Image (spheres, grey):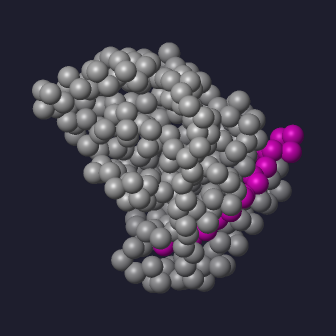
């Protein structure tokens, strides 16, 4: 493993690798790595001669300054975790000034893809994601780039970004990795209190029940049930929710897996399939998850 902090040093190493005919893959991350990230890195390292892992908390994708301030930063531990991956791996941990030597003036627009779910809740977020991802694409020039499906809307946005800028990069979506109790792994999970972490798997459990309900209930009823079930959890399970601990669901939408537009029935999406995407606040931490309908 080799570690880089500047663009020039990383590009010089990659230029040498390209002259040797080596293929390069990219795993963009904001650090605070967990097993979900490692699954992406392992796949990247297995499918490319060199896997580049970026470790950069991108300030321009945060529309909430408090969330940016609280985002976990664990660079030393991250580098140690990456070192456990077999294969040739480069880490890239630049400063903000290194990534953005000039003021950022570029903005991106994604039409209907950003007008649902995360888009209205986090104005400017996807443009900020697109800016940093394109910057990483320009620096690394990978053949493939790997993203987790937990950020399902982001994955669709990145694919559209590649279409817009006409880059020859394969975007590889990788399955969600979950803890043994079902909670989707996330860097934000480490901010949960012990009591909140204990009940957090309820999100996944509720989505699994929603998938079963969708086979025989109207989707509007399924969505209402999910929202109300989580919102009332603390009332039904007061013994598990001390000091006012409760779920605050922000949205739950069942959408076409390709267009991300809401559907009224599972059959409406046809071969694209349907995905249920959710955002929930718990213990001051915003958690997202999803369920794919029609899959076991």
Residue at x-position 87% and y-position 40%:
243
Kindly identify the residue that appears in the image at 62 percent across and 39 percent down: 60
How many numbered marks appear?
A: 0
Residue 267 in picture, x, y percent from top left: 45, 83
Q: Is residue 179 left or right of residue 22?
A: right
Q: Nearer the viewer, residue 217 or 4?
A: 4
Residue 247 lies in the magenta-colored region: yes
Residue 31: x, y in percent?
Answer: 51, 29
Closer to us: 221 or 173 = 173
Residue at image x 58%, y 62%? 114
Can residue 168 be seen here? The reply is yes
> Viewed as shown, does residue 22 lie left or right of 4?
left
| Viewer-side residue, 261 vs 178 | 261
Q: Quadrant of the image for the N terminus? A: top left
Quarter of the image that includes the C terminus? bottom left
The image shows residue 281 at horizontal and vertical percentages of: 72, 49
Residue 220 rendering spot, x and y as whole percentages? 65, 79
The magenta region covers 240-256
Furthest residue toward left: 20
| As drawn, 232 above or below 266 | above
Q: Would residue 230 appear left or right of 112 to someone viewing this image?
A: right
Q: Residue furthest right?
A: 243
Q: Residue at x 50, y 29 (%)?
A: 99
Q: Please state if 274 lies on the left or on the right of 168 as rendered.
A: right
Whether residue 198 is visible, yes or no, is no
Instruction: Say whether residue 128 is magenta.
Output: no
Give the vertical position of 167 relative to 259 (above or below).
above
């Amino acid at each position: 493993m080799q570690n880089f902090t500047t663009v020039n040093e990383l590009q010089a190493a990659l230029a040498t690798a390209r002259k040797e005919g080596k293929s390069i893959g990219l795993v963009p991350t904001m650090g605070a790595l967990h097993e979900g990230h490692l699954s992406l890195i392992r796949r990247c390292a297995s499918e490319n001669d060199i896997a580049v892992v970026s470790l950069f908390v991108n300030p321009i994708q945060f529309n909430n300054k408090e969330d940016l301030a609280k985002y976990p930063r664990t660079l030393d531990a991250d580098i140690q975790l990456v070192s456990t991956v077999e294969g040739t791996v480069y880490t890239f941990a630049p400063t903000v000034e290194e990534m953005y030597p000039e003021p950022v003036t570029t903005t991106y627009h994604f039409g209907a893809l950003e007008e649902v779910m995360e888009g209205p809740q986090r104005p400017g977020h996807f443009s900020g994601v697109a800016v940093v991802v394109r910057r990483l694409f320009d620096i690394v020039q990978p053949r493939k780039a790997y993203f987790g499906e937990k950020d399902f809307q982001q994955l669709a946005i990145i694919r559209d970004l590649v279409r817009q800028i006409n880059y020859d990069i394969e975007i590889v979506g990788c399955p969600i990795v979950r803890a043994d109790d079902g909670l989707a792994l996330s860097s934000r999970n480490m901010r949960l209190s012990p009591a909140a972490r204990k009940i957090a798997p309820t999100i996944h459990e509720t989505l699994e029940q929603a998938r079963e309900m969708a086979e025989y209930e109207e989707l509007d009823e399924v969505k209402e049930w999910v929202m109300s079930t989580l919102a009332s959890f603390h009332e039904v399970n007061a013994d598990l929710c001390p000091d006012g601990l409760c779920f605050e669901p922000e949205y739950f939408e069942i959408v076409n897996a390709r267009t991300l537009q809401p559907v009224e029935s599972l059959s409406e999406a046809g071969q694209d399939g349907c995905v249920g995407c959710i955002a929930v606040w718990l213990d001051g931490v915003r958690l997202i998850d999803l369920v794919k309908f029609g899959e076991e």
